Amino acid sequence: MPKRLSWLQSRFLEGKITKSESISFILIPPWRDRIFEALIMSILVDENTRVVVQGITGREGTFHTKQMLDYGTTVAAGVTPGKGGQKIDGVPVFNTVQEAVEKEGVNTSCIFVPPPFAGDAVIDAASGGLEVIVCITEGIPVLDMVKVARFLEGKNSVLIGPNCPGIISPEKTKVGIMPGPIHRSGDMAVISRSGTLTYEVVDQLTGVGFGQSTCIGIGGDPIVGTTFIDHLKRFKEDPETRGVVLIGEIGGTAEEEAAEYIEREFDKPVIAFIAGQTAPPGRRMGHAGAIISGGQGKAEDKIKALQAAGITVAVNLSTLGKTALDVMGKI
């Protein structure tokens, strides 16, 4: 971003200058034509994000590095211990995250490391001071994640995942495995426990004319780095997010806790869907965290909690786009 716009954006976000004053301040091209783009906020990632791909030399890491590059993401470095000095699609490979930070100024990680080593990869990224850590890896041992969660306490790093599709701010950057073409820039946020359902919902939103501010897959494992509430707090403060779609599933109490928070503190419209409505108790459905156990985690309980908080719940996934149109059209 040009220095003048960067300075102006920081002044706007600090509340020292209004948007109308900003527009008056910048009167001549090319600044005038880019003012709205410069002032639009993103959650956690944007066009200034510099990504390091941990596990870049593996099959998945190599494939999705190219996909991110093609989308326009600045993939500045890769990390695979013992393979430093190589290049993957022009991206330099280092042995440690710290090297990548020092030499390429990376601030965000995308992890494609095998499950037995993924926990250590998260710790390596956090030790390097990265602001956002996106862990795509599925199947990390629960005890490893307990250690990761303890290590991250008090750190400034935000962990998204594991077992997630990542995060995307459409037409700015994507960090993860989401299909870029279905996304459009706009004012609807998406937070989801399911990767595949995220794509379906985004496609429906785009189809009915709603672009997205930021879409986040928080992950489907029993222990994840961030929750619905963590991101709802961010979207609450984002002036460019007008509404939120929340995609939950059976297992745990994350949706019930989110419903309590929304009723108490969140003043933007929320549309929700809960997956696994026909799942039998005790049967794991896809994700490690998607299981009804101990009488908790039933879809019907989650739906009741969300509806009691004033949230519109789409019982049928195929109607979510229309539901969002109905709800947002009344505002």
Image (cartoon, helix red, strand yellow):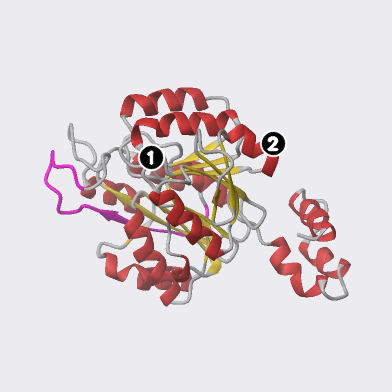
| Quadrant, the N terminus | bottom right
Count of number-bearing discs: 2
Residue at 33%, 42% in the rendered image:
138
Residue labelled with disc 1: 257
Residue at 39%, 40% in the rendered image:
162
**For the residue carrying disc 1, how many other residues have a C-alpha within 10 Å: few (<14), some (14-19), or many (20+)?**
some
Residue range in magenta is 267-285
Magenta stretch contains residue 197: no
* For residue 192, above or below residue 153: below
Q: Amino acid at mark 2?
A: Glu
Q: Which residue is more in the foreground, 200 or 115?
A: 115
Q: Which residue is more in the foreground, 101 or 253?
A: 101
Specify the label residue 102 is tagged with: 2
State yes or no: discs 2 and 1 in contact (Cβ < 8 Å): no
Decide which of tag 2 and tag 1 comes sooner along the chain. 2
Image location (x, y in percent) of residue 177: 43, 56
Q: CA distance from mark 2 to mark 1?
A: 40 Å
Indicate the secondary structure of the residue bearing disc 1.
helix
